[in-house]
C-alpha cells in the first residue's frame, strides 16, 4: 500500500487540466503510471471516499478530488463520518 | 518607496464558488469589505502586488515541500480549480522585484525556495478576484507551507515578515502586500464546519494590538484543534511583520458556517 502514490495521483488530477481529462476519460489507463495496489485502484475508480479518507489521504487533496467528481459537501461529509468517526 | 498598502484576508473557496450559500447580508458585508480594500489599495497606486498565501498541494507535493517559496515567473496561470467560478487565465508576474526580495531575504538569513513555474489556486485568486479582478497589476506569490508537518513556526513567519519589511523599505517600486488565508477552518476533515470564532476574534485582537509574543506562540496542536486550515494564520502573522509599523484595523469578521470558515478582513494604514 502506498499512500504517497494515491496522493500523488490525486494531486496530479486536481492541479492539471490535461491529466484530469485523461483520468476522467479512462481512469484505469491513467493509473498505470502510478504504483498502486488493486485495493487502491478500486478505491480511486469507485471513488470510495471513506476508504480514501481512512487511508490517510490529506483532506486538501481528497475534498477537491471529490468536487471534481461532482460530490456535494453533505455527501462527502456523510462518507467520511461513517463508522463511528464524528 | 516602502510598502504602500497592506491587508490580510480570508480566501476560503466558498467566497466565489458558492456565493449564495451563506446568509445574504453577511456575504454582502464581506464583499463590501473587499470593495473597501480595493478602493484603498488603488488609491495608493501600487505597481506590484506581493501575495502571501498558503500551499494547497497546487505547486508542491511530498516529493519536495518548501517552507516558503517565492514566485519568479513572468506570468502565472490560475486558478487551477475549474470549480471555483473565477475565470481561468494568466496574470503577469514581476520577476525583477521578486529577485530583489529573494536576494534581500538570503542576505538577511532567510533562504526562501524560489520557482520560475508556479500556478495560482484559490489562495491567491480569491483575493485577486476582488482586489484586481481584471488582473492588470503584476503579482508575486509567496507561498507558505501551512498544511503538512513540519511547517515553519509562527515566529519564523514573523521574522520573514520583518525581513520583507526591510527589503521593501529600500525598494523604489510601490508594492501592495496582501496576506490570504484562515481563519479557523477544517476543510475536508471529519470536523469540517467547525469554526472557533472566539479564537479568531482573539487572534485578530492580538494582531491589532501587536502582541507579537502571543500571536507567534500558538502551538501546532492548538491550531490543529481548531482545524488544519487554522495553520494558515501564518500568512497573517507574516504580514504583521511586514506591517509592523502600521496600524491594523479590522474591517470584517464573521464565522460563516455555509463556507465552514471564520472569515476576516484586516486593513493596515
Image (spheres, grey):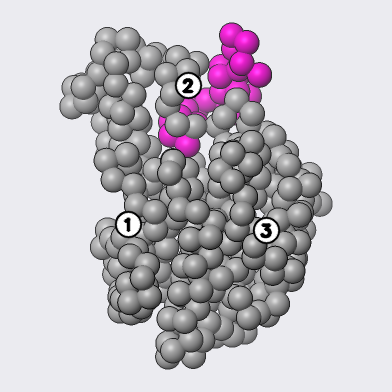
- Residue at image mark 2: A53
Query: Toward which corner of the image does residue B225 lie, by quadrant?
Result: top right
The percent position of residue A46, horizontal first and vertical second, equals 39, 13
For disc 3, the neighbor class at 10 Å (few under 14, some 14 to 19, many from 20) is few
At 50% across and 61% down in the image, what residue appears? B157
Element under label 3?
helix
**Is-magenta flag for residue A78?**
yes
The numbered disc on residue B118 is: 1
Q: How far apart are marks 1 and 3 (CA)?
A: 33 Å
At 75% across and 65% down in the image, what residue appears? B251
| Residue A81 to residue A59: above or below | above
The percent position of residue B108, horizontal first and vertical second, equals 38, 75
The percent position of residue B12, horizontal first and vertical second, equals 59, 48
| Residue B186 to residue A42: above or below | below
Magenta range is A60-86
- Residue at image mark 3: B214
Whether residue B66 is visible to the viewer of this picture, yes or no, is yes
Left or right, B107 with reference to A34 = right
Amino acid at each position: 500500500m502506498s499512500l504517497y502514490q494515491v496522493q500523488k495521483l490525486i494531486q496530479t488530477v486536481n492541479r492539471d487540466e490535461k491529466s484530469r481529462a485523461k483520468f476522467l476519460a479512462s481512469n484505469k489507463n491513467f493509473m498505470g503510471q502510478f504504483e498502486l495496489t488493486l485495493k487502491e485502484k478500486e478505491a480511486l475508480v469507485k471513488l470510495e471516499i471513506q476508504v480514501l479518507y481512512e487511508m490517510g489521504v490529506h483532506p486538501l487533496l481528497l475534498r477537491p478530488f471529490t468536487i471534481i467528481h461532482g460530490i456535494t459537501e453533505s455527501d462527502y461529509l456523510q462518507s467520511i463520518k461513517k463508522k463511528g468517526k464524528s | 518607496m516602502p510598502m504602500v498598502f497592506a491587508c490580510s484576508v480570508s480566501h476560503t473557496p466558498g467566497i466565489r464558488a458558492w456565493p449564495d450559500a451563506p446568509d445574504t447580508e453577511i456575504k454582502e458585508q464581506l464583499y463590501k469589505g473587499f470593495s473597501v480594500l480595493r478602493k484603498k489599495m488603488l488609491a495608493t497606486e501600487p505597481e506590484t502586488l506581493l501575495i502571501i498565501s498558503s500551499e494547497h498541494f497546487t505547486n508542491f507535493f511530498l516529493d519536495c515541500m518548501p517552507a516558503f517559496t517565492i514566485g519568479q515567473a513572468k506570468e502565472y496561470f490560475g486558478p487551477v480549480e475549474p470549480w471555483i467560478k473565477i475565470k481561468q487565465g494568466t496574470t503577469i508576474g514581476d520577476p525583477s522585484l521578486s529577485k530583489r526580495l529573494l536576494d534581500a531575504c538570503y542576505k538577511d538569513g532567510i533562504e526562501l525556495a524560489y520557482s520560475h513555474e508556479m500556478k495560482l489556486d484559490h489562495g491567491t485568486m480569491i483575493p485577486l478576484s476582488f482586489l484586481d479582478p481584471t488582473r492588470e497589476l503584476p503579482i508575486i506569490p509567496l507561498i507558505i507551507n501551512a498544511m503538512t508537518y513540519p511547517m515553519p513556526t509562527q515566529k519564523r513567519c514573523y521574522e520573514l515578515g520583518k525581513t520583507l519589511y526591510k527589503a521593501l523599505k529600500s525598494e523604489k517600486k510601490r508594492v501592495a502586500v496582501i496576506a490570504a488565508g484562515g481563519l479557523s477552518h477544517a476543510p475536508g476533515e471529519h470536523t469540517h464546519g467547525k469554526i472557533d470564532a472566539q479564537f479568531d476574534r482573539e487572534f485578530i485582537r492580538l494582531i491589532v494590538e501587536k502582541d507579537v509574543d502571543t500571536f507567534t506562540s500558538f502551538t501546532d496542536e492548538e491550531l490543529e484543534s481548531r482545524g488544519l486550515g487554522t495553520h494558515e494564520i501564518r500568512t497573517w502573522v507574516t504580514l504583521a511583520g511586514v506591517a509592523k509599523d502600521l496600524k491594523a484595523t479590522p474591517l470584517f469578521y464573521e464565522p460563516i458556517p455555509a463556507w465552514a470558515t471564520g472569515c476576516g478582513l484586516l486593513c493596515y494604514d
